[in-house]
Image (tube, grey):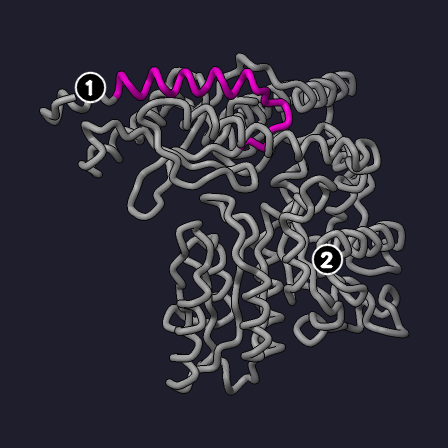
Amino acid sequence: MDLKADGDASELACFVSAMFHGVRETAPDDMLVRRPSQDEVNKLREMAVPGIARPIGEVLQDTNKILSYRLATAHPKFFSCIPSPVSWLSWLGDCATTAHNPFSGSWEAGSGVCTVESRLIEWIAKLFGLPSSAGGQFVSGASMANLTAVTVARDQKLEIEQRAKGVAYISEEAHFCIRKVLRIVGISDNQIRVIKTDDEFRLNTVELQHEINKDVADGWKPFLIVASCGTTNTGSIDPIEELSKIATNHGMWLHVDAAYGGSVAFSENHRAKIFCIGSADSIAWDAHKWLYQTHGCGAVFFREQSHPLKSFSGSGGYVRDVECLDAPCDPWNYGIELTRPARHMRLWFTLQVLGLERIDKMISSAFDLSEHLEFELREKRDWQIISSSSLAILTFRYAPEAIRSNNSVCNDCNTAISKKIASENKAVIFTTRLKKLVCLRMCTINPNTTMEDIDEVVETLDSIAKATATRLTAKHSVRF
């Protein structure tokens, strides 16, 4: 049966060309947020269900329509989501790889892509400061990387009969996927200790040590510490070297969620900021956050490449002709997936074309932008810095003296500022909550953002903030 769709091949070529230019070019005046109306949602629902065969041109038009509703995360004035603008090189590398549809679950089935993946993992592990014994594999993202790592941690540190007593320790600033992962591997909420952070929003090691000692005395089995290298809220880096010592002293596993911050290892100018992650037993990382890759490009690393075998090694008679016979070296033995796409090839393609010097400059620009943003806000009256620039993330809020003591009004003010600046299509700056304060958060990792963009956004924020505060003070009868 011929699987080719009817239609003019030139239409497909035009669509591919349009997609290519759409990925490569970002129109600064494009809508930052585009949501469908209820009528449009109804049309999308109708469009979702297949029927009779249609001309490919019509389907391509519908495809563009569906994809038009989105947050424009690639826009130079979109500062709210950590996934960075996608390099057209990643898209192109992904397209080329997908066209070949390689199977990277075994060496026999995909020796080319498996060889490149293995070497790339080895090279990145070295950038992270892991020893030569390290290994790992590419996965769909940090959620899967964290799940893979925590599964291995459980199997390495807990006997089956100990699992009901196993205790994991996470920061209150840990990504919410960590709790999800722990539940999946059988660690219930009463076995999870949430440790408060210090003034820099880093995991508090004094409180951690106290909790571990208390749990040991109460008959629990501490087995896992999860640290963050680049928290989502503030970009903070937990005191990983100190956490490593605590983990070693108690025979525990140290996992580092470096989904965001791990990319700094690719910058020679800034690598030292995160070199501490090399003391971890496992690391989760996302190339699709700060290394400009299309979604679905993450990785998990282990200090000892053999550790995942206890959790994942397996075989079946139906794979006897495509598995390694000498040793369990096939990638499916080191992770959850059997059918694995070659996710790493888009990253390989990008790195080969751009080179490390260009990547270094792109990452370095993010630090410069964030530091400039902090400086400009400190120069403005009534703005408070909640967390200083860390890994290109800054949190701040507008808090004029008239409403500063009224936390509820101040929170409403910053919420309104965020909504107003987006509604005017000036920038997207979402809010977050830190220590009961609603604040604004900006992540400046887009290499297309300029210092002039930052200056313009700061002026716009200041203007909107003053008008918003005046309106709210009148509403709440506060003297301003």
Residue 140 place in picture, x, y as percent: 64, 50
SS at mark 2 in the image: loop
Q: Which mark is residue 216?
A: none
Crowd around label 2: few <14 · some 14–19 · many ≥20 (10 Å) = many
Name the quadrant containing residue 105: bottom right
The residue that appears at 40% across and 63% down in the rendered structure is 195
Instruction: Let me know if residue 176 appears in the view.
Output: no
Image coordinates for residue 245, horizontal then vertical, percent: 58, 71
Is residue 144 located in the magenta-colored stretch of the structure? no
Residue 178 lies, with reference to residue 188, above or below; the image says above
On the image, which quarter does residue 441 sit in? top left
Range covered by the magenta-colored residues: 444-468
Q: Which mark is residue 471?
A: 1
Q: Residue furthest left?
A: 477
Q: Quadrant of the C terminus?
A: top left
Determine which of the numbered discs, if any, sits on residue 129 in the image. 2
Other residues around mark 1 within 10 Å, as few (<14) / some (14–19) / many (≥20): few
Q: Is residue 43 left or right of residue 366?
A: left
Q: State the image coordinates of residue 131 (x, y, percent, origin top left).
A: 77, 64
Q: Give how far across and how far down residue 189 sits, in percent.
A: 38, 68
The three-letter code of the residue at mark 1 reads: Arg
